[in-house]
Amino acid sequence: MMENAARSFAQEILKEWNSGNKNYEKVIFLCGKGNNGADGLAAARMLYGKLPVCIFCPDFPKTEEGLVQTKMCQALNLTFLSQKQLLKSISEKSPKIIADCIFGTGFHGEIPEIWKNILDSANISDSFRIACDISSGLYFCAHKTVTMGTLKTLLFSDKAKEVSGEITVSELGISSTIFEAASKNDSNIFLLEEKDIKLPLRNKENTHKGTYGHSIIFAGEKSGAAIMSAEAAMKFGSGLTSLLEFNFSNLKQFKISPELMICSKIPKTAKALQIGSGLGNSENPEIQKAINDFQSWFLNEKNPAAVIDADMFSYKELTKLLNSLKKVKGGRIVLTPHAKELSNLTGISSPAVALENRIQIGKDFTKKYPNVTLVMKGANTYIAEKGKIFIYNGGSPSLAKGGSGDVLAGMITALLAQGYTGLEAAITAVFHHGNCAKKTGTRNYNLTPKKLINLI
């Protein structure tokens, strides 16, 4: 398996060397004392004679496999650098490839100072950086990560997204299904792909607007958010879309598209409700009455559906509300918090919910609320339902703009109104929302909610 892992890693390095991107001078392997380092030594050995390679390995691997790889590299007289030679080589302006084979997925704690200084130099160097299995300590800023055997959940934390670059899976000569079967902790975690979405394409000829549901968006103190949600819902196939206006709504300051309807109470034709986007302070008695109307509708409707977003995560009695709503047979609820809102919802500190802990949070929360689909927004979006986790890793920085979440909430509402399950609606909307953003470029800074809606 180590030979297969090293061969795959070496092939990726060779591919980059021959790509013509840069006229590389050398390949520097940074090798730790575990099996990740042994993988690096083996890959360096395989590239010896094809490319100019050198190795920095302050402590040779102590495992049986690692000792074998060390002896073979020494027998071939591969170049081993001192720390001084390494830092000088990294600082040279000539382009090079730096291969990170220091720490694998089993690493915990702080990176030793010797490695931290080296990685700091590597990260700012004019080099192509490639990581073996995973970026060491999620500190090495890789352009590409070659992970071994199967994808690891740690690769999809917010921190990992910043440092992993392009992720490819290396074959180890063992089927990935065997790896997945052996991983009890990750058996209910899935990475979303294009084939998992179900766009609301209209394949039937004999239909009418009522066939595609009526979405109701609560318009609050900041009704611009509700308008964006409603426009997104209309764009994503909702047959009818209405803004629900209250005395505290500020709808009148906006020019509203004639495609949208405005109502003063929840209509009998309503199929899905959205509450929270720009709603306002829930301690306001009028807003509390609007929440009560929402609760009453959900409790008395057959197969009700709702999206709870934004300001509702500051509502102190949200847990009590969810406990009452989970009694409704066939009820579908989608919650769409970002990290701070998830912290409010669960009582867990913001730093904790922002990382890979969201997997366990999602499992625990949706086991407690079986009619809830939890969409945990972030650099990667985690969707949880009934203890299962679905990860979308296609989000881009262009979406980091006020209103992007309101667009997503409207898209989910539209799908619920069209009869989707909570999970189907969340997966399809999250994936398509991300795909729409990519059409403008993943690093684009001028993507606005209106542009995003037009791309739906």
Image (cartoon, rainbow, N blue to C red):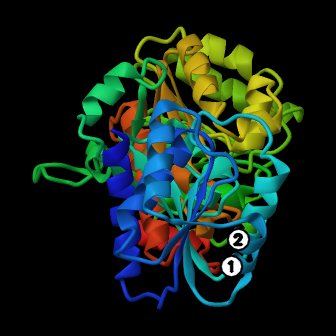
Residue located 83% across and 32% down the image: 349
Nearer to us in this view, 269 or 239: 239
| Mark 2–mark 1 CB contact (< 8 Å) | yes
User: Please, is residue 212 above or below residue 236 in the view?
Assistant: above
**Front-lying residue, 210 or 348:** 348
- Badge number at residue 86: 2
Instruction: Check disc 2 and give the amino acid type.
Output: Leu
Q: Is residue 25 visible?
A: yes
Locate residue 384 relative to residue 397 in the image: left or right.
left
Q: Where's the C terminus, which quadrant?
A: bottom left
Q: Residues within 10 Å of mark 1 (few under 14, many from 20)?
A: some
How packed mark 2 is, by other alpha carbons closer than 10 Å (few <14, some 14-19, many 20 or more), is some
Q: CA distance from mark 2 to mark 1?
A: 5 Å
In the rendered image, the quadrant that contains the N terminus is top left
Amino acid type, callout 1: Ser
Residue beneath the point at 30% across and 42% down:
172
Q: Nearer the viewer, residue 139 or 236?
A: 139
Residue 214, horizontal then vertical, whole percent:
42, 43
In the current view of this chain or complex, which residue is farthest to the left?
A: 205
User: Residue at point 60% right, 17% down?
Assistant: 364
Q: Report the residue at 44% width, 67% height from top.
A: 436
Q: Position of residue 27 (x, y in %)?
A: 51, 73
Quadrant in the picture for residue 250? bottom right
* Residue that badge 1 annotates: 89
